[in-house]
Image (cartoon, rainbow, N blue to C red):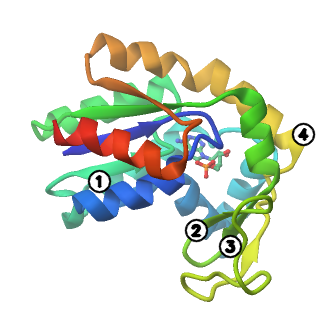
Amino acid sequence: MNLILLGPPGAGKGTQAKKIAAEFKLPHISTGDIFREAAGSGSELGVQLQGYMSAGKLVPDELVIKIVKERLLRPDCGNGFLLDGFPRTLIQAKSLDEELAKENRKINKVISLTVDEEEVVKRLSSRRVCLACGFAYNLNSNMPKKPDVCDACGGKVIQRADDNEDTIRKRLKVYQDQTRPLIKYYTDRQVISETDGMKSPGDVFNNISAVLKK
Ligand code: AMP
């Protein structure tokens, strides 16, 4: 099964992707995680990537497409994959379809998570994430038992540099302008299913599971 999780920042894509990947035994490919890891390395490319992310801008298509193309060729993607945060532009979506078609593969399902903009701002400005495993915490509802230490892996829990209100609003604008058109793209291809991302993470996961098991 070749899957895409689509939705604005803060819709819960990362949280759901981890659960889906575990339940359906799919490699979880998050372009945001890949870029944050590269940015953390301090290389020249990493510094450039950090610049785009901190400004709430998209990384250029050419670079993102090259990285995802290489990742999808790895053997663990042979029986399917779960893309989280990619594609984010029509150019990326078309390029992905072309690459998959070369190997007689295609996208089987796109799960579109919907959430209100003000809820996104609220969620992301109070979000804290584990640097090591990416687990997402929330200042208001779910904090690690030991301050700044991940319950799951012991990693350091931090606030992402792009999770401040100014950058969150920029990221939402980028989503509306560049990523939202993908809903029509995948609706036309009859592969999209919409899920209400305002519900609790457990309910959202149950809804997604039901769609994927059909
Ligand atoms: P995320 O963790 O998915 O919110 O992504 C964090 C940041 O990484 C985004 O705000 C972009 O700067 C960059 N990024 C992640 N995925 C993509 C993509 N598919 N295209 C362009 N930029 C991306």
- Determine crowd level at label 4: few under 14, some 14-19, many 20+ residues with C-alpha closer than 10 A: few
Q: In which quarter of the image is residue 151?
A: bottom right
Secondary structure of the residue carrying tag 4 is helix
Sequence-earlier tag: 1 or 4? 1
Sequence-earlier tag: 3 or 4? 3
Residue occupied by mark 4: 166
Sequence-earlier tag: 2 or 3? 3
Q: Which residue is drawn at 43% across and 61% down?
A: 18
For the residues bearing labels 2 and 3, Cβ distance under 8 angstroms: no
Choose between 81 and 124: the one closer to the eye.
124
Whether ligand 1 has any atom under 8 Å from the Cβ at mark 1 is answered as: no
Sequence-earlier tag: 2 or 4? 2
- Tell me, for residue 72, which label it has, or none: 1
76 vs 82, left or right, is left
Residue occupied by mark 2: 134
Secondary structure of the residue carrying tag 1 is helix
Residue occupied by mark 3: 40
Q: Distance between the residues labelled 1 and 4?
A: 34 Å
